[in-house]
Image: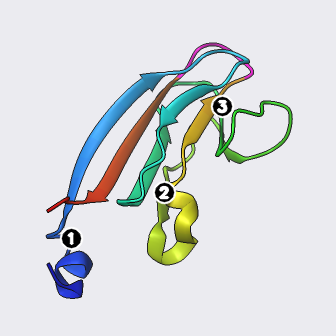
Amino acid sequence: MCMEDVRMGRAVSSVMLSININNITSTLVLDNDPMRTVIVFSASNANDIMLRTDDNTVSGGLYIPTASPAITLTVAEHGHIVTKAWYAFSTTGAPTINIIVGSLEKK
């Protein structure tokens, strides 16, 4: 594998996840993964979702409002925060979050 493989996406495998998250309490949606290079977060229904790299539900984070576009985070643009564990929570309902994860293939 060379840098060109990484740039072209040939060395990255992807998965799509749909996870139901809890109302008020945080739900672990992605474990820590040092091989992760990209995450795309999207809310699939009419409830706002908050994303954090810890399970704190009191203060801010990345906010996905209802009917908003997906949030894309890459190692190239956002650094190692992409590789950390991610938690999601909502203050209303029990929404579903859709996630696309791209990780370097382990060889």
Query: How many residues crowd mark 2 within 10 Å: few (<14), some (14–19), many (20+)?
Result: many
Query: Counting residues from the N terminus, which is met first, the one under dot 2 or under dot 3?
Result: 3
Total number of numbered discs in the rendering: 3
Amino acid type at mark 3: Asp
User: In this image, 104 relative to 97: left or right?
Assistant: left
The residue at the point 60 percent across, 35 percent down is 87
Quadrant position of the C terminus in the picture: bottom left
Q: Which mark is residue 83?
A: 2
User: In this image, 29 relative to 55: left or right?
Assistant: left
The residue at the point 24 percent across, 51 percent down is 14
Residue 46, x across and y down, in percent: 58, 24
Q: SS for tag 1?
A: loop
Query: How many residues crowd mark 3 within 10 Å: few (<14), some (14–19), many (20+)?
Result: many
Residue stretch rendered in magenta on the structure: 91-95
Marks 2 and 3, how far apart in space? Answer: 23 Å
Image: 75 above or below 26: below
Query: Counting residues from the N terminus, which is met first, the one under dot 1 or under dot 2?
Result: 1
Which residue is disc 3 drawn over?
48
Amino acid type at mark 1: Gly
Which residue is disc 1 drawn over?
9
Between 31 and 88, the residue placed more toward the observer is 31
Quadrant position of the N terminus in the picture: bottom left
1 or 2: mark nearer the eye? 2
Residue 7, x across and y down, in percent: 26, 80
Magenta: main secondary structure equals: loop
The residue at the point 17 percent across, 68 percent down is 11
Magenta segment includes 27? no
Query: Counting residues from the N terminus, which is met first, the one under dot 3 or under dot 1?
Result: 1
Amino acid type at mark 2: Thr
Q: SS for tag 3?
A: loop
Q: SS for tag 2?
A: helix
